[in-house]
Image: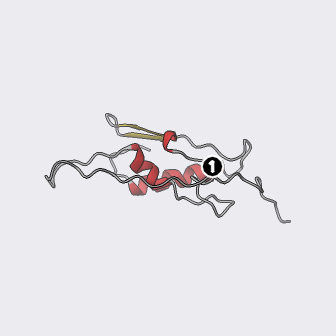
Amino acid sequence: MVMGLINANPVIHEKKERRVRQAPETTDENAVELIDQLEIFDHIRDIKDPEHPYSLEQLNVVTEDSVELNDESNHVRVTFTPTVEHCSMATVIGLCIRVKLIRSLPPCYKV
């Protein structure tokens, strides 16, 4: 039995241009480079949706505003919005985001 797509016709959004980060003002190579929301978003924006050949950004599942970062406690929180309320792939999407961030960020960050 072949199952159909949960959302056969998703709305596709334009990808935003990647913003260029400013070069650090200090030349001290031992200085700690802070991670910001934009960097975290850059890590997850191109994750492919499990059902469609589009990225999570193109499907508006993740946005820059959905990333929260607490520098004091090194906590990262990403709130994602599946394309449909009853999306059975929501757990898979959440795990993909989590694994990507765990592999991309320094180990001091809690995802």
Q: Viewer-proximal residue, 15 or 63?
A: 15
Residue at left offset 65%, top offset 64%: 53
Describe residue 43's horizontal placement relative to residue 9 as left or right: left
Q: How is the image coloured?
A: secondary structure
Q: Name the spot of residue 99 as percent of width and height, x first.
A: 49, 55
> SS for tag 1?
helix
Up the image or down, 79 lies above or below 50; here it is: above
Q: Name the spot of residue 47 as percent of width and height, x first.
A: 54, 58
Q: Residue furthest left?
A: 28
Q: Name the spot of residue 39 as percent of width and height, x first.
A: 39, 50
Residue at left offset 62%, top offset 43%: 81
Residue at left offset 40%, top offset 56%: 104
Residue at left offset 33%, top offset 46%: 35
Describe residue 37's horizontal placement relative to residue 10 as left or right: left
Q: Amino acid at mark 1?
A: Thr
Q: Quadrant of the image for the C terminus?
A: top left
Q: Quadrant of the image for the N terminus?
A: bottom right
Is the residue marked by circle 1 packed among few (<14), some (14-19), or many (20+) residues within 10 Å? few
Q: Which residue is mark 1?
A: 91
Describe residue 17's horizontal placement relative to residue 61 as left or right: left
Q: Name the spot of residue 11 as percent of width and height, x first.
A: 70, 51
